[in-house]
Image (cartoon, rainbow, N blue to C red):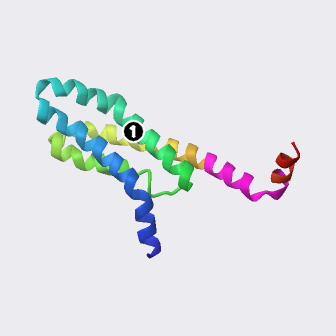
Amino acid sequence: MTEFQKKLVKLFPYILILLVAVYATGLVPEIFGDQGYYFSNFMLLYGLPAVFAITAFIFATKNGFKWYFFPIGPVIFASSIFVFYGGDTGFFLNALVYFVFSMVFTMTGSAIYRKREYIRSDPNLMKEKKKK
């Protein structure tokens, strides 16, 4: 496997979660009619930022900071704007908010990843832990 293929294999589960969350939010009003709009609006306001934040945080704690991860979710959402929401420009503000959530939680998760890597790599810290 090449390096690019290895990166794609690492990204695939996270991208799949984001795809399902974004497209399920858009499909619910199509399937359930007027009742689905309440769920869709709730997901647009609270659910999708939470999904983007949790996914970015988990990815970053496992893989560290990757600059190409946090724009993936907002790009997926931006493509769904034209499919489900008629290209309304107001939804691009949602994409910006999702980008910020994803970026902040990616940086937070990568800080935790770096701290773990530092603890693993410093032999003096390991000796001190064994003494206690």
Kindly identify the residue that appears in the image at 17 percent across and 41 percent down: 84
Query: Is residue 29 or residue 83 the one in the foreground?
Result: 29
Tell which residue pokes out farthest to the right in this image.
131
Residue under label 1: 51
Which image quarter: residue 49? top left
Quadrant in which the N terminus is drawn: bottom left
Res 83 seen here:
yes
User: Amino acid type of disc 1?
Assistant: Val
Q: Residues within 10 Å of mark 1 (few under 14, many from 20)?
A: many
The x and y percentages for residue 86 are: 14, 41
The x and y percentages for residue 91 are: 26, 38
Is residue 121 within the magenta segment? yes
**In the rendered view, would you say 11 is above or below 106?**
below
Q: Main secondary structure of the magenta part?
A: helix
**In the rendered view, would you say 20 is above or below 31?**
below
**55 left or right, relative to 78:** right
The x and y percentages for residue 108 are: 57, 43
The x and y percentages for residue 67 are: 49, 57
Kindly identify the residue that appears in the image at 45 percent across and 39 percent down: 53
**62 left or right, relative to 30:** right
Tell which residue pokes out farthest to the bottom in this image.
2
Kindly identify the residue that appears in the image at 40 percent across and 41 percent down: 52
Query: Is residue 92 or residue 13 the one in the foreground?
Result: 13
Q: What SS does tag 1 mark?
A: helix
Kindly identify the residue that appears in the image at 38 percent across and 40 percent down: 98
Q: Which residues are magenta?
A: 112-125
Quadrant in which the C terminus is drawn: top right
**In the rendered view, would you say 11 is above or below 35?**
below
The number of numbered badges drawn on the structure is: 1
Is residue 47 within the magenta segment? no
